[in-house]
Amino acid sequence: MRKISLLLIVAFFTLFSGCSNQPIVVDHQLSDPHVRYENPRLYKWLKFDFINYIQRDDGMLEFEARFINTSKFNKSLAYKVNWKNANGFIQKTLMSRWVFAEVETTRSFVVHGISPNPKSKDFEIILQEPTKDDALRKDSYRSTYQH
């Protein structure tokens, strides 16, 4: 009797544990160490889709990152790429300027970059929502906007 009960319990768990034939949906990752959102509001509408990066034969880093505007409206965005040397220090280059972009509703937005020189060993994409007073700021962090 005891063996029959044990056999029934094992059969029951085996039967119901195999019933979940639903496919597992793997969503794209939510972020990457190379991507930094400066405004928490960006998480509500700008979905990180993927990033791909390689070191080319000439020693330069190249990347492509894609984001998707999940809102029902076109949105404004400012981004810049900081290139870092082997010690993690930011290299000051012309490419490290803020760039404005208009991201259409439900459309993808791609940021592509190639390092300025082979000494660049890492990079960071910084994203933020532009504000009305950005042009008036004189600090070094925001003074390099480009339209």
Image: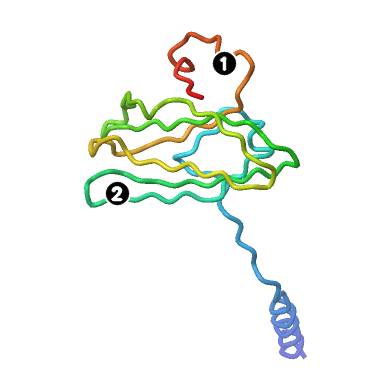
Mark 1: which secondary structure? Answer: helix
Q: Position of residue 114 (x, y in %)?
A: 34, 41
Give the percent coordinates (x, y) of residue 123: 38, 37
The amino acid sitting under disc 2 is Gln
Q: Which residue is mark 2?
A: 55
Residue at horizontal 28 percent and vertical 36 percent from the top: 120
> Measuring 42% from the left and 35% from the top, which residue is drawn there?
124
Q: Nearer the viewer, residue 108 or 52?
A: 108
In the rendered image, residue 43, in percent from the top left (x then y), is placed at 64, 37
Using the numbered discs, state the Cα–Cα distance from disc 2 to disc 1 in whole angstroms: 34 Å
Q: Residue at x 46, y 41 (%)?
A: 33
Tell me, for residue 41, which label it has, or none: none
Residue 84 image-quadrant placement = top left
| 36 w.r.t. 68: above or below | above
**Residue on which the image places disc 1:** 134
- Closer to the camera, 33 or 118? 118
